[in-house]
Amino acid sequence: MHRIIRIIRQIRRYNSVAISKNQIKFIRQLEQKKFRRRAGLFVAEGTKVVGDLLAHYQPHTVFATDDWLKDHASENCHLSSVITEVTDEELRRLSFLQHPQQVLALFPIPLPTDIPLTSYLSPLTSNLSLALDGIQDPGNLGTIIRIADWFGIGQIVCSEDTVDAWNPKVVQATMGSIARVNIIYNNLADFLDTLPADFPVYGTMLDGDNIYTQPLTSHGLIIMGNEGNGISPEIRRKVNRRLLIPSYHTDDTAESLNVAIATAVTCAEFRRRQGA
């Protein structure tokens, strides 16, 4: 306990200046993609999300309340120079959440640079990966990243018009899973053209075949489409294995499943087959 108190005092000694209006403005601007890209930083909040990210990435800055410091200062003492203690009120002014959760951190965006499309093929050869075609809702993307993490899918290829994964709402919805899933943005059509002609490319479609009766491979790419329009016509033409999650309602029913729910059902069936 005395060691923790010494660490907290050290953090306070290094970072005793109150949060400035410019700092607040800077962090609030990171809600917008153009400012995130310009700064190369994204925002994470809450003990769970920040804790998972701290296990994988070096933070740029951490703003934490006294309660968080008491519980977590000892395990993060090597970060004392980037941790600033804030009051609950200061954290509220920084936070994007209705109810701030003790800690907010800025992390560098892990952007791959000058990586050829062919370098993405290696993880696909023996594993399942996801591809997202025009997903727009931050909550859906965050949930899909969390689903991928749960089912051991380590790579998601996103079309360029898919919502930015480093949006604060997306990061929050992942509940820390964004630290364990590799997310790639690229021209999805160009990426699919790099795949061998016989490579399994699955797509969920209303005119597909019942997923529960079709053969499923242990590797391949599963494409999930836009919330309202599904998979775009260009990408649809590149799918060689069409799947349908059947409805079991005989009368009028929902038009379709939420894309995150459909992703969970699809991934669960692929993994169930592998464990059978």
Image (tube, rainbow, N blue to C red):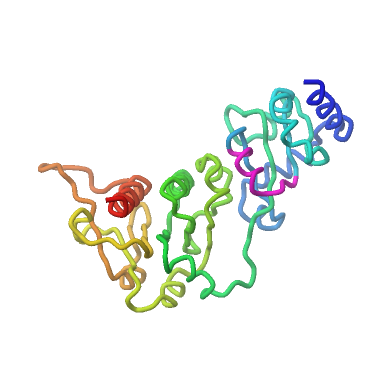
Above or below, 255 against 121 in this view is above
Which of 116 and 24 lies nearest the eye of the viewer? 116
* Residue depicted at x 33% and y 58%: 230
Q: Quadrant of residue 99?
A: top right
Residue located 75% across and 31% down the image: 74
Residue at 72% x, 46% y is: 59
Q: Is residue 100 magenta?
A: no
Viewer-nearest residue: 212 or 60: 212
Q: Quadrant of residue 222?
A: bottom left
Estimate the x, y position of residue 246 in percent, counting from the top left: 19, 50
Q: Position of residue 112 (x, y in %)?
A: 62, 64
Q: Is residue 219 above or below residue 262?
A: below
Residue 71, position in %: x, y?
Answer: 69, 26
Is residue 243 left or right of 73 when viewed as pictured?
Answer: left
In the picture as drawn, the residue positioned furthest to the left comes out as: 250
**Between 268 and 37, which is closer to the camera in this rendering?**
268
Total of numbered circles in the picture?
0
Residue at the top extreme, as displayed: 1
Residue span colored magenta:
49-60
Q: Is residue 250 above or below residue 214?
A: above
Q: Position of residue 81 (x, y in %)?
A: 83, 40
Asked whether 54 falls inside the magenta stretch, the response is yes
Q: Residue lying farthest right?
A: 13
Locate the N terminus and report the quarter of the image it occupies.
top right
| 127 left or right of 8 in image | left
